[in-house]
Image (cartoon, rainbow, N blue to C red):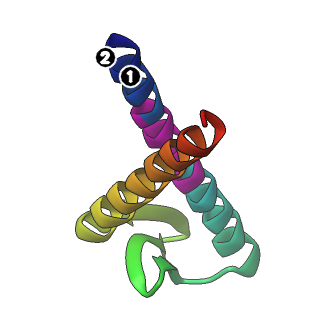
Amino acid sequence: MKHRLIRLSIEGLASFLIITALLSMSISGAYAYVHAERMSSYTLNIFGLGFYRIFRSAGKISGATLTQGMSIIWLVGSVMLWSLSEWRHHWTSR
């Protein structure tokens, strides 16, 4: 039981960190895209759900988190990665 709890905790923490890194990379790439294309605004979407908005104001590029979208995407992504790691463990430990 103790080993299972440790494994589940590590998988959960790893899924949170991986989703955070993927979202950070997508936001960084979007900043580069907005800068290169000289766009006035850009909203990052996943399946139509906006989670980050980048805009240009007075020549400077700024961004803001769309809280509800970011929360949903982060939570769903983390649960999906955690489920995938559990599925992998289930099939490899047979």
**Position in image of residue 45 (x %, y %):** 48, 79
Task: Reply yes or no: does residue 51 show up in magenta.
Answer: no
Residue under the point 62% across and 63% down: 31
Residue under the point 68% across and 80% down: 38
Furthest residue to the front?
A: 94
- Left or right position of 70 against 14: left
Residue under the point 56% across and 60% down: 27
The residue stretch that appears in magenta: 12-23
Residue 85, can we see it?
yes
**Position in image of residue 16 (x %, y %):** 43, 41
Q: Amino acid at mark 1?
A: Arg
Q: Secondary structure at mark 2?
A: loop
> Distance of mark 1 from mark 2, alpha carbons?
5 Å
Furthest residue to the bottom?
A: 48
Above-or-below relation of 81 to 89? below
Residue 10 picture quarter? top left
Q: Which residue is mark 1?
A: 4
Disc assigned to residue 64: none
Considering depth in this image, is 24 or 35 the residue closer to the camera? 24
Mark 1 touches mark 2? (CB < 8 Å): yes
Disc assigned to residue 1: 2
